[in-house]
Structure formats: C-alpha cells, structure tokens
Image (spheres, rainbow, N blue to C red):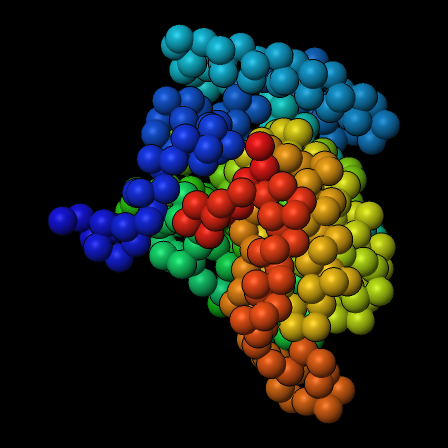
Amino acid sequence: MRYIEFVRPDSLRVWKNDKVRERLSWYYSVMRGVMPPKYLIVKNLTIDLKKNELTVISTEELLKEHTRLQKAFNELWSEIRESKDPWKHLKNKVIETPTFLDLKIELADRLASPCRLCEWRCGALRSEGRMGYCRVHGLNAYVDTFFHHMGEEAPLVPSGTIFYVGCNFRCVYCQNWSISQREGLPSEEKTSEELADIQKWLALNGAININHVGGDPTPNIPVILKSLKYLDIKTPQLWNSNMYLSSEAMELVRDVIDIWLPDLKYGNNACALKYSVVKNYFEVASRNIRIAHDSGDVIIRHLVLPNHVECCTRNVLKWISENTRRALTNIMDQYRPEYLVVRQPDKWSEIRRRVSTEELRKAFEIARDYGFEGPVEDLWYLE
Ligand code: SF4
C-alpha cells in the first residue's frame, strides 16, 4: 500500500466524486499532467517590447501592455482547455524576447517600492530594504519552512507547502503567529533561484501542488513571480491567502495560479478590525475571491469562530451562495484559542474557547438553508 493511501485515504477517495472533479477540473487536469500549469502558458506569450525597454517604459504603458497580454492569455488558455493535445500549444524552446511573465515581474517590482502589494498600501520602499506593515523587508523571500503537508483539504494532499515569514494581518488568535508575526532571519532569506529550487524539490518528491502560504504570500509576489522564470515543473501553483491583495497585485497573480485556497473569515468589517486589525476587509477579500473564482478553481475556507455564527458565518455563506457558486467551501471547526487570546484572556473572553457542537450544528444548518450540499470529505458545494 502506498504511503498516501495509508495516511490520507480521503485524498484518493475524494476524486471519485463527480462534483469535486467538476469544480476542480482545471487543477485536476494539471495535477495529472494532462494540461500545463498556467505559469507555463504565461511564459509562452511574448510581449511587444525589447528587454531593455521594459525597465524604462512608464508604468501606464506597461499596464496597457499587461491588459493586452491578459486578453491573449485568456484566448490561449481557452484554446488549450479545448484542445485534444494541450501541450502542443506551448513552444518547446527558450524564448529570447521578454514574455508576459517578465512584464509581470517588472510591474511587481514597481508595485513593491513604494509598496502597494496589499491594500494596506503602506508605501514601504522594499527595494531599499525597508520593512512594511507586514514585517517583510527587501525583495527576497524569508521562508520559515517547507514540507509535504498532509493536513490540507483532501484534493490537495500531499501539498508542497512553503511558509513565508510575515503577514499583513494581526489576527489575535493566529495559530501560526511564530511565523506570521515576526521579521525573517538572515538564515531564512531566499532568492528567486533558491525559491525555485525549493519548488522543484517539493515537486520531485511527490507534492501534487506548490502551496504558497505564510503568514501570507502577498508581500512576496515579486520573488514568487521571479522564481517561476527558473521553473519548468508541471505542478499546479496554489495561492493560500487572506486575499488582502491590492487590485493591481491581484491582476499580476491571477494568471499564474491554478487553484486558490482563500480564507473568508469574517462576514463584516467590524469583526475583521477587532480580531485581525484590518480595514475594509469584506470589500477587499470578497472582490479578490470573486476574481479568483473567475480565473481558476477555488476552495474557500471559512473558520467558524465562537460567538460569531450569526455575524460572520451567516454572512459569509450567504455571500458565497450569491457570488461564487462554483467554489467548494470548507466550513472549518478547528478554531482553538492561541496567541493573544491566551496571553490576554480577559480582553478576548468571547473567543477564548473552541466552537461548541451547537454552534457547528447551526453553521451547517445555515449552509443548507443557503443551498449548500455535502459535505464531501469536508467540502460543501452549491448546485
Ligand atoms: S505587502 Fe507589506 S509592505 Fe506591501 S503594502 Fe502590504 S503591508 Fe505594506
């Protein structure tokens, strides 16, 4: 018996379900090598500029070219999806002229200084090594650890997970606070080539996707895009994020990600401000999740919080049922008090416990009221 069949039999069983295969059809076909990952398609589109022009041309002109290439990308992607021989659409040679990926990298570097990669738009001069609100500095990545994660949703296991240091949220109950709420150490610094090597190692050793997480991957968009230049693996790229990307950053990432794993924690801005110290949460996260839904396969994670079923769970499930019906949803029960909730118990008393059976029952009842069916291995779906 193979290791995976023993440790996570659900990761094989889940693909027998028609609904899961249909909703994750792109990811499923990339994972099996039938289709190329999107980043390889992006690398195949050349742009109407010479290499030396890329760095001197105005951002406005680059954005216009990006819009044009995005249209070309969507046409090629659509051809590939419908083709009987999808790989033949990709050129099998080293491309000398700048590609759509080079354009994205140039735009990402510009967005990072002053930094507007996320909706904090804190303006840190990252190219000069300055640190942002997210505690990320410079343009290289700081990687706490990377490994084959066996605890993700069934269709994602084993997941080649890379934990980036730093985060643009300040969740008082963060389970990963030792990674998210600190600066990277010099020993953790990774260049784009080193980050590509990590991804290759994960893929060669059995990862069925490359899972960019943290903290949050958003502050690392420039180095992640650059790492794709050194990659040729056929493994799907996965974005595991709080989805607080700026709209400009979202446009850069959307074309290279095969499957999205966004959080949608709060159903209103007041709860987001109180527990994650973040403004305009719902508008930003929902805008980006809608874009992800329009450009790939999505599993939305909703963590049920104690005493927040009506104000958060209800609104989140209602929004999903009205806006992203193709997405699969994981209604998660694994909240536990951590970090500041433990250190300042009186201040956070309303979330200083696990979710009760009654609250979970209510969350599932709300899901069914909004038309969700399932779950299939923890994943709910809408018809
Ligand atoms: S990603 Fe970090 S540095 Fe960039 S705007 Fe957001 S908080 Fe600031």
Question: Measured along the vertical axis of the image, is residue 132 above or below residue 357?
Answer: above
Q: Image point 52% across, 67% down: which residue?
A: 334
Work out whether 260 lies above or below 62.
below
Q: Residue at x 69, y 16 (%)?
A: 71
Residue 198 position (above or below residue 172): above
Which quadrant of the structure image shows residue 36?
A: top left
Q: Quadrant of residue 109?
A: top right
Q: Quadrant of the C terminus?
A: top right
59 left or right of 127? right
Quadrant of the rendered image containing residue 347: bottom right
Whether residue 19 is visible: yes
Image side of residue 115 versus residue 76, left or right: right
Q: Picture coordinates of residue 40 (x, y %)?
A: 49, 25
Picture coordinates of residue 48 (x, y %)? 70, 13
Q: Residue at x 74, y 31 (%)?
A: 55
Position of 15 compared to 273: left or right? Answer: left
Tell me which residue sits at (34%, 46%) in the image.
Answer: 11
Q: Nearer the viewer, residue 330 or 241?
A: 330
Residue 116: give x, y in percent of width and height: 80, 48
Residue 50 position in % (x across, y down): 68, 18
Q: How many marks?
A: 0
Query: Which of the two residues, 64 or 156, is positioned nearer the viewer here?
Result: 156
Q: Can residue 185 be seen here?
A: no
Closer-to-camera residue (146/189): 146
